[in-house]
Amino acid sequence: MSTTETIASHATNTSATSQFDTKSALKFITCGSVDDGKSTLIGRLLIDSRSVLQDQLANVSKSGEADLAQFTDGLSAEREQGITIDVAYRYFNTAERKFIIGDAPGHEQYTRNMVTAASSADAAVVLVDATKLQWQDPALSLLPQTRRHSLLCHLLRVPSIVFAVNKLDALGIDASTAFAHIEGALTQFAQAADIEVAAIVPISALKGHNVVESVANWCGYTGPSLLDILENLPVTPADTALPLGFPVQWVEKFSSSSDTTQGRRIFWGRVAAGLAQVGQRIKVLPSGQTATVAQVLSTTRQPGTVPAGHSAGIILDREVDVSRGDWLLALDPLAPSAPVSDDDFSDTPSPSSLAASREISATVAWMDDEPLVAGRVYWALHGHRWVKARVKRVVHRLDINTLAEETADTLPANSIGHIELLLQDGIAALPFAQSRVQGALVLVDTASHRTAGAVMIHAGAQ
């Protein structure tokens, strides 16, 4: 199947399949190597979609032409150096849908900011600068940061990854050859890394080619423009099919109430998985106490069922000691695996919920300047709960150039590897492949309090 057919098929399937939401606001990021044109692309999208006011346009214009990158580079250091340091978010909409764009930095030392943006994105547009590559060579090598950002988006379960080959207008009549060779290299890399690519599209962020409007048969490409592709990408589906997982962020007291038939505190947070609904039996982690959900409130304090991805307030049927950082987990009866003995007076099965895990096997994107070594202790943040975590061992490090898993005993800054952690207390962990919330940890240095690593859990050993 050709690239054009693949893109058209993807757009058709995602819009026609009811389980994919292609109408809600799409949150996507632009990423890739340094100076590949990420900020310029966002500026082009804002201008060509008519989402910029005249006074904003005047503020970023030089010599009568708009400096497109200035729309997102808001820090003074970014403007002075001409680089992106922090993630900048911009909003625009078309007749089809609304968009939230995150402009992620390309510099290797700011990889932690890129990971932050990608962790909640529905899609990623990975920019590839054609002028930086040996495009004459069909077996060309991609830039390390292009590979690193693509791998991180894949590991962070960004549902849709789009490669945008930029600056092809600078190559003149050789643009078609360059795009064909770069497209081949990207396809080969994606297949080797098991990355499902939504589209590969040639663009010129500076000139606007194939960004909002398609240019017929430019670079041998006849598919939709980048904006057309984005309008048909699905948002990340909520994990509503999983059992309830609810991290408590804030406890609201209304102890003056005279109603003693239920608890007199509201536990607020965002539902991580499943549905928060009245009548659900729950267990509190780490205390192990059990209760039943008496009321569920929306953010406007309206009663009803609240699905994963939305904030809710939960009131229990009795007073239970619950604090910020605790988890409310679905408690379902478990059918007995062995016959009940004659001297067992209980005829009800033992309740069970997601078991707490202390030993964690995971992939980590290491972002601290200090390397990760076995034996070090970090703070681990799971939901809103902090626990101490010790690195048992570094299993391997991923070579981003060959995609080989190399034996290693340390992970330097901006590397990706497989580690094993031992936690001071158990957490309600699910594999990251099942849940982006319950399967994720953040490691924080205990001394400097810097964010050190983003952890994607594989499994827990009880």
Image (cartoon, rainbow, N blue to C red):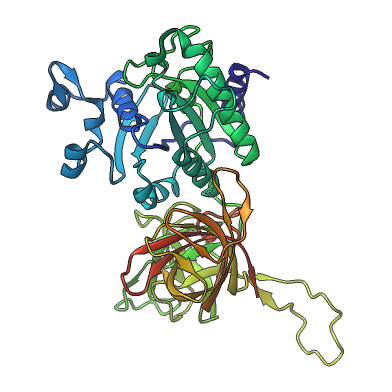
Choose between 369 and 37: the one closer to the eye. 369
Decide: is 160 above or below 15: below
Choose between 409 and 329: the one closer to the eye. 409
Residue sitting at x 28%, y 27% = 43
Q: Position of residue 389 (x, y in %)?
A: 48, 74
Q: Position of residue 317 (x, y in %)?
A: 49, 74
Residue sitting at x 54%, y 49% = 155
Q: Position of residue 197 (x, y in %)?
A: 57, 32
Which quadrant would residue 167 be assigned to in this image? Answer: top left
Q: Quadrant of the N terminus?
A: top right
Decide: is 246 above or below 143: below
Q: Is residue 366 visible?
A: yes
Question: On the rendered structure, is 241 left or right of 49?
Answer: right
Which quadrant would residue 195 be assigned to in this image? Answer: top right
Residue sitting at x 56%, y 51% = 239
Residue sitting at x 45%, y 33% = 125
Q: Position of residue 379 (x, y in %)?
A: 42, 72
Q: How many numbered markers are drawn?
A: 0
Q: Quadrant of the C terminus?
A: bottom right
| Residue found at the far bottom of this picture | 343
Choose between 434 and 60: the one closer to the eye. 60
Which quadrant would residue 335 be assigned to in this image? Answer: bottom right
Q: Is residue 30 visible?
A: no
Question: On the rendered structure, is 41 left or right of 195?
Answer: left
